Image: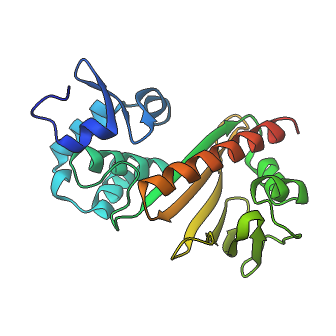
């Protein structure tokens, strides 16, 4: 049972053990320690002492960048997790009230090689699954099985693809981003982020869909 002095939202968003946070918003202490040098308990204490409980999301991110020199990805992840603990955000929910599904996978292949695979015909067939050949460039439209359609909006070479994604029964389009981050020792990090989802149910459905996709991507890229 959650302790009385913890915000109710933390209980549902986090896993606790002996007063130590083990996981917040799908980010574990083990992963956080590996990439930032600190666990959730440390970051919560640091941000509380800095007065971040009254800050906006942008102010928290700016502090993590300037004061603690965290990467863009971990600035957002730490800020999001901290906002879950203060009750400003439900796990997986944006400040606009929509939900996000984020999947990551580390691979022992360098960033450029992984990127080239992602924009190759083979790679596109695996992660996008278009009904007809698609060129990865801004303004390109696509359609996949089930009536899903969208448009590639932004391509940042070697790093990111951003596109719209709309399913037949959805009232509004959502946003999907594929990131390829550079890591040390010739490794890279694949990230698929689906934003703008209307409900927790949509988040669960798309998280399952993208988990299967990113795992297959990682296996094929690792075999290059």
Question: As displayed, is residue 27 above or below residue 100?
Answer: above
Residue 168: x and y in percent read 63, 72
Residue 201: x and y in percent read 46, 53
The quadrant in which residue 121 appears is bottom right
Residue 205 in view (yes/no): yes
Horizontal side of 101 relative to 76 (left or right) equals: right
Q: Residue furthest left?
A: 4
Image point (42%, 53%), residue name:
200
Question: As displayed, is residue 4 above or below residue 116?
Answer: above
Image point (72%, 70%), residue name:
147
Please name whichever residue, 121 or 211, is drawn nearer the observer in this view of the structure: 211
Please name whichever residue, 139 or 213, is drawn nearer the observer in this view of the structure: 213
User: Where, quadrant-wise, is the N terminus in this rendering?
Assistant: top left
The quadrant in which residue 98 appears is bottom left
Image point (25%, 39%), residue name:
10
Q: Residue furthest top?
A: 18
User: Where, quadrant-wise, is the C terminus in this rendering?
Assistant: top right
Question: As displayed, is residue 159 above or below residue 223?
Answer: below
Residue 72 in view (yes/no): no
Please name whichever residue, 142 or 62, is drawn nearer the observer in this view of the structure: 142
Residue 210: x and y in percent read 64, 49
Residue 44: x and y in percent read 25, 39
Q: Residue furthest bottom?
A: 139
Q: How many marks?
A: 0
Image point (56%, 48%), residue name:
207
């Amino acid at each position: 049972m959650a302790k009385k002095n913890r915000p109710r939202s933390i209980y549902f968003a986090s896993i606790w053990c002996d007063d130590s946070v083990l996981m917040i918003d799908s980010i574990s202490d083990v992963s956080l320690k590996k990439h930032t040098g600190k666990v959730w308990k440390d970051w919560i204490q640091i941000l509380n002492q800095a007065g971040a409980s009254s800050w906006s999301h942008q102010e928290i991110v700016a502090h993590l960048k300037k004061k603690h020199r965290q990467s863009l990805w971990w600035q957002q992840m730490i800020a999001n997790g901290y906002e879950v603990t203060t009750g400003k955000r439900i796990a997986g929910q944006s400040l606009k009230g929509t939900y996000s599904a984020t999947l990551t996978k580390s691979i022992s292949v360098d960033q450029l090689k992984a990127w080239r695979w992602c924009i190759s015909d083979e790679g596109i067939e695996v992660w996008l699954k278009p009904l007809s050949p698609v060129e990865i460039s801004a303004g390109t439209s696509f359609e996949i099985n089930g009536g899903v359609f969208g448009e590639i909006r932004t391509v940042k070479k070697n790093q990111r693809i951003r596109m719209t994604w709309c399913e037949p029964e959805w009232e509004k389009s959502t946003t999907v981003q594929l990131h390829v981050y550079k890591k040390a020792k010739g490794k890279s990090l694949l990230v698929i982020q689906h934003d703008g989802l209307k409900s927790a149910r949509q988040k669960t459905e798309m998280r399952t869909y993208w988990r299967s996709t990113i795992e297959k991507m990682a296996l094929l890229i690792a075999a290059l």
